[in-house]
Image: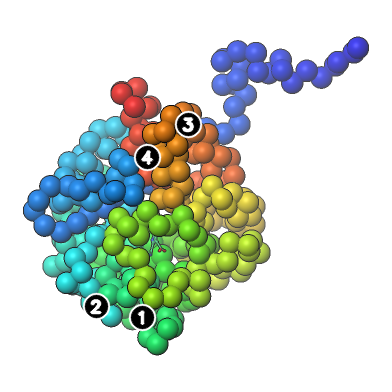
Amino acid sequence: MKIIRRPRRSRKSDVIRALLEETKLSLEDFIFPLFLKDGDGTKEAVPSMPGVYRHTVASLLKEIEECILLGVKNFCLFPFIDDTLKDQFASESYNPESIYLKTVRKIKTHFPEAYLMTDVAMDAYSSDGHDGVYQKEAILNDETLPILGKMALAQAQAGTDIIGPSDMMDGRIGYIREVLDKEGFKEVLIMAYTAKYASALYEPFREALGSTPKKIDKKTYQMNPANRREALVEATLDIQEGADVLMVKPAICYLDVIKALKDCYNLPVAAYNASGEYVMIKAAAQNGWLDEKEVMLESLISIKRAGADIILSYFTKEYAKLLNKSNF
Ligand code: PBG
């Protein structure tokens, strides 16, 4: 038997495999999502997300410092807001003395080298647990815009570098870009949640934030998981409206969508490795069913291979530790 082409020649040793490796993960691609809560106490473990905490201001600053020493440069911050501060119109979201905005200012003062992404959506501050104004079994689109504008502006004033409007409704990017530009924040980037699916994989995150919707689900604004071409419609709009980066969320179940955006457009593509994707690996590893490190690396490389330039992942610090060869 004559076999001329033998692809196994290219897999013979570590050296040749590394030489021919098509995709390389880099810590610089990562954004690390962190949770912040009010109060002086101590940080709290998030029960639904092993290894993830609701930080106090002090423990958050320590965590960021540790991460920076490990080489992590990019962070994304979400707030756990006390129920007593929530209302129908999320007014705490643009209160300059809110724990979130105070902490954004602190982070930027203590760590000017850290690149910080902040979240623009009502859910963390809404007594209804929705991303927009809830009224009579409906989520209002246009009526939510002025609230998002105030929130984005307050975050820009607090010193954020990049804004992530995560509510997946219409006209967000254009509206927020206009507000920011008018107020002199032309240099603040916008990462559009271009294709955010109505996914069951956000459950652990909602527990972390205490933001589970009280009534109705999010299917009238987040996308149907069955749709890929609709993501292209969303991307076209976000680009027209001024987005700097397009994002797909979740990541692992939507690798084809990441690839579609990468192939069809010239903007950077980000992928949000959602909380449910993180805990599936954690839970299986805790049971001894999967090798956590190997599955983590395989899933992260698959996101990159699909075309993501940026990966938002709760694994960021563990990946950084692994690179630093400390005790993973
Ligand atoms: C809400 C928001 C969600 C996530 C990020 N921003 C949850 C939701 O849409 O209900 C999910 C993050 C994750 O699961 O890791 N604006």
Rendering quarter of residue 284: top left
For the image shown, how many numbered marks are present on the structure? 4
Q: Which residue, as the protein is rendered here, is positioned at the far right?
A: 1
In the image, what residue occupies the spot 52% across and 62% down? Answer: 197
- Which residue in the structure is indicated by mark 2? 87
Q: CA distance from mark 2 to mark 3?
A: 43 Å
- Which residue in the structure is indicated by mark 1? 133
Q: Earlier in the sequence, mark 3 or mark 1?
A: 1
Image quadrant occupied by the C terminus: top left
- Which residue in the structure is indicated by mark 4? 316
Label 4: which secondary element: helix
Q: Please give left or right for residue 196 compared with residue 166 in the image.
A: right
* Callouts 1 and 4 close, C-beta under 8 Å: no
Numbered disc in front, either 2 or 4: 2
Image quadrant occupied by the N terminus: top right
Q: Please give left or right for residue 274 compared with residue 58 in the image.
A: right
Given the image, on which type of amino acid does mark 3 rest? Trp
Q: Nearer the viewer, residue 61 or 220?
A: 220
Q: Position of residue 297 (x, y in %)?
A: 48, 33
Given the image, on which type of amino acid does mark 2 rest? Asp
